[in-house]
Image: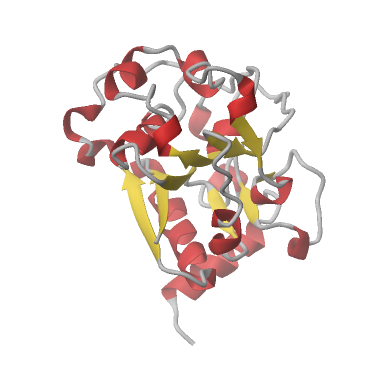
Amino acid sequence: MIKVFIGYDPREAAAYNVLCHSINARASAPVSIVPLALSQLGGLMWRERNPLQSTDFSFSRFLTPHLCDFEGWAIFMDCDMLVLDDIAKLWELRDDRYAVMCVKHDHTPKEDVKFLGAVQTTYEKKNWSSVMLMNANKCKALTPRYVNEASGLDLHRFNWLDNEDLIGDIPHRWNHLVDYDPDLPIQEISNLHYTLGGPYFADYAACGYAQNWLDEREKMLFAG
């Protein structure tokens, strides 16, 4: 069973549901998808919302290993994505040498504001944590207490790992940053990431690869 945890924010409910459809429509193996919705996490998240926090799941993503009882592997994904490939291909990349595997972006945003007026922040390892293959047994530092009390930078920079040798690479195609990364033929991309804002927001209706997302939504809504 491929375990997928997806960050959930009520303001991006459309994005979440289209992402789920895109995964299920292309998967060649059974997939279990869990939304990381704060309303469903009970007492696991108690930290106050940070003014720089752009989504409800900025920090809850790091509860993924705990929710797996620190056993096996799981995939975490932001909800502002569109999977264009078989998620089993990403799952097959699991390597027990690592605690976490991700696309190691060298990403420095130029804008100050992104979707819904959220402050755009810049930090080392920006967007590394937006798609993660997580080896739960090697992520035992991510207890609920740590996730709630550690700084955002410590979490997103993977400072909870003993060393950076525990961070493995996955191919860039699994986290293509729309309107940041160079435009590529769609067959060269496995996962589109509308990190600045997707076509489900009026202000980003004309973003890169908008039609791909709109087409996926139509396939989800209308059979045939």
- Please tell me in which quadrant of the rendered image residue 157 appears: top right
Q: Which residue is at 35% across, 42% downward?
A: 71
164 or 78: nearer the viewer: 164
Front one among 141 and 145: 141
Q: Residue at x 40, y 35 (%)?
A: 137
Residue lying at the far left in this picture: please name it.
42
Does residue 110 lie above or below 81 as drawn?
Answer: above
Direction from residue 75 to residue 171 in the image, left or right: right
Q: Nearer the viewer, residue 92 or 110?
A: 92
Q: Is residue 57 visible?
A: no
In the picture provided, is 177 more to the left or to the right than 41? right
Where is residue 117? Give x, y as percent.
Answer: 51, 28
* Residue 128 shows up from this direction: yes
| Quadrant (top left, top right, bottom left, bottom right) of the N terminus | bottom left
* Quarter assignment of residue 39: top left
**Is residue 64 shown left or right of residue 205?**
left
Indicate whether 86 appears above or below 134. Answer: below
What residue occupies the far front of the structure in this picture? 97
Q: How is the image coloured?
A: secondary structure
> In the figure, is residue 55 to the left or right of 203?
left
Towards the viewer: 183 or 168: 168
Above-or-below relation of 52 to 54: above
Q: Residue at x 48, y 39 (%)?
A: 134
Number of marks in the image?
Answer: 0
- Outermost residue, bottom side: 224
For residue 120, above or below residue 178:
above
Tell me the residue at 59%/25% (across/down). Answer: 113
Q: Position of residue 94 (x, y in %)?
A: 56, 48
Residue 3 % position (x, y): 40, 53
Q: Position of residue 20 (x, y in %)?
A: 44, 60
